[in-house]
Image (cartoon, rainbow, N blue to C red):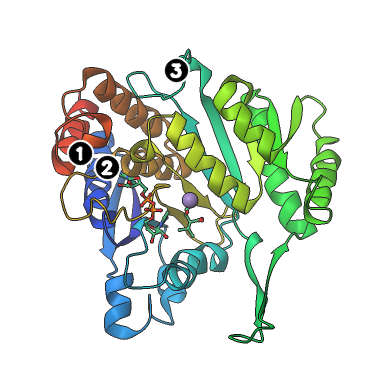
Amino acid sequence: MNHYNIAVIAGDGIGPEVIAEAKKVLCAAAETDGRFSFSFTDYPWGCEYYLKTGEMMPKDALKTLSGYDAILLGAVGYPGVPDHVSLRDLLLEIRHGFDEYINLRPVKLLHGAPCPLAGVQPEDINMTFIRENSEGEYAGSGAWLYRDTPQEVVIQNGVFSRMGCERVIRYAYELAKKEGKTLTSVSKGNALNYSMVFWDQIFEEVGREYPEVETHSLLVDAASMFMVKDPKRFEIVVTSNLFGDILTDLGAAIAGGMGLAAGANLNPERKYPSMFEPIHGSAPDIAGKGIANPLASAWTAGQMLTFFGYPEWEERIVCAIERMLVEKKALTPDLGGSASTSECGDELVRVLGE
Ligand code: NAD
Ligand code: IPM
Ligand code: MN
C-alpha cells in the first residue's frame, strides 16, 4: 500500500468549497482501489491569514511543504489584499520555489459540456497545454523608478533562460512523441525580438532531436484566433508563462467554462512536491454561496493520481465527469444546473463508484 501525505492549501473564496470535494474524490478513489491511501494536512494560508499575520504564509512554509508528496491548492486572492501581494507571496512563491516548471493544462471538450463555438464537436477540442511555469514574464524581475514623480518609470523584464526554455520545450516534445500527437509552439517573435526569437530558435533546435514529431509554430495573436475558429488544429501546445495563462482561460471558455478547467504544476524531477490546482481563481462573485463548480478541482485531483502513477484514475474521473455532464442531474449553476457544490461532488463520487 502506497501512502501519500498531501498538504492542502484551500486558500480563499471558493477554494475551500471546491477542495472539500476534491478530497472526497481522492478518498473515494483510494477506498475503491486499495493500492494507495492519503492523509491530508490543512494549512490555513491565504488572504485571511495575511490580514491576521501580515504574511500570506509563514517564512518557513516551503520547508514545511517540502516534506509532502504533493500540494493540493484551491485558489488564492481576495478583495482586501492586493493581488500582486497575495499571488506573488503564495502561489508564485511555491511554483518558483519548488521549480514547478511545467504547468500542464488539459483543454478537452467533454460530451455534454457547453461550448460557445458553432459547429464544433467534442472530438474537435482536445489539447494539452504545456505552459512554462518558472520564468518568462512571471520572473518578477523589474524596477519601479522615481516613484510618484513625473519621471516615474516601471520596467517588467521577461526572463528567458536557455535552460528554462529547453526543459519545457523538451518536455512538450517528449509528450508529443509519446502520444503520437502534433506539437504547436506559440510565441511572438515578430514583436518580442529577444525573448521570443530565442524561444523560436530553441523550439527548432530541440526539435532536431524529434524528427518524428510534426510541429507548427504560431504567433500568439493568430493562435488565439485559431483556437476559436479552428480548435482542431491544436494537440500538444507549448508556450511561455503569460501566453499560457491567457490562452488556457480561452481554452476553458471553449471547453465548458472555468468550472471544468484543471491544471497541474509539476516538478518532473520530483525533487520538490508538485502542486495541483484548478485554473480558476477564488471567484469572489460566488464565494460562500455553495454553488462553485467542484469538477475542475476533481479533475485536478485526477491529475495528481496520474502523477503518482495511477493514470487510470484520472481517466475514470474524467469519464465520470463526462457522464454527469450528459445526464445533467447534479450540475452547478455555471453549467445550467441547480445543484450545490457538495451535491455535485457527492454525485461524482457516486458515479465513480458504479
Ligand atoms: P476567477 O477564475 O476567480 O473567476 C472568473 C469567473 O469565473 C467568475 O465569474 C467566477 O464566478 C467564475 N468561476 C471561476 N471558477 C468557477 C467555478 N469553479 N465554478 C463556477 N464559476 C467559476 O477569476 P478572477 O475573478 O479574475 O479572479 C479572482 C481572484 O482569484 C483574483 O484575486 C485573482 O488574482 C485570483 N486568481 C487566483 C488563481 C489561483 O489561485 N490559481 C487563478 C486565477 C485567479
Ligand atoms: C493561473 C492564475 C495565476 C497565473 C495568477 C493568479 C497569478 O491566473 O494560475 O492561471 O497567472 O498563473
Ligand atoms: Mn490564469
Residue 132 appears anywhere in the view: no
- The residue under label 2 is 294
Q: CA distance from mark 1 to mark 2?
A: 7 Å
- The residue under label 1 is 345
Image point (46%, 22%), residue name: 117
Where's residue 206, x and y in %?
81, 41
- Amino acid tagged 2: Pro
Rendered view: 335 above or below 119: below
- Number of the label disc, if any, that sits on residue 122: 3
Rendered view: 207 above or below 94: above
Depth check: 290 or 212 in front?
290
Q: Quadrant of residue 207?
A: top right
Image point (78%, 24%), residue name: 212
- Amino acid tagged 1: Gly
Q: Quadrant of residue 163?
A: bottom right
Image point (66%, 87%), residue name: 146
Rendered view: 115 above or below 119: below
**The residue tagged with tag 2: helix, strand or loop?**
loop
Q: Residue furthest front?
A: 150
Depth check: 45 or 150 in front?
150
Left or right: 80 as drawn, with respect to 193: left
Image point (32%, 23%), residue name: 322
Depth check: 236 or 119 in front?
119
**The residue tagged with tag 1: helix, strand or loop?**
helix
Q: CA distance from mark 2 to mark 3?
A: 21 Å
**The residue tagged with tag 3: helix, strand or loop?**
helix
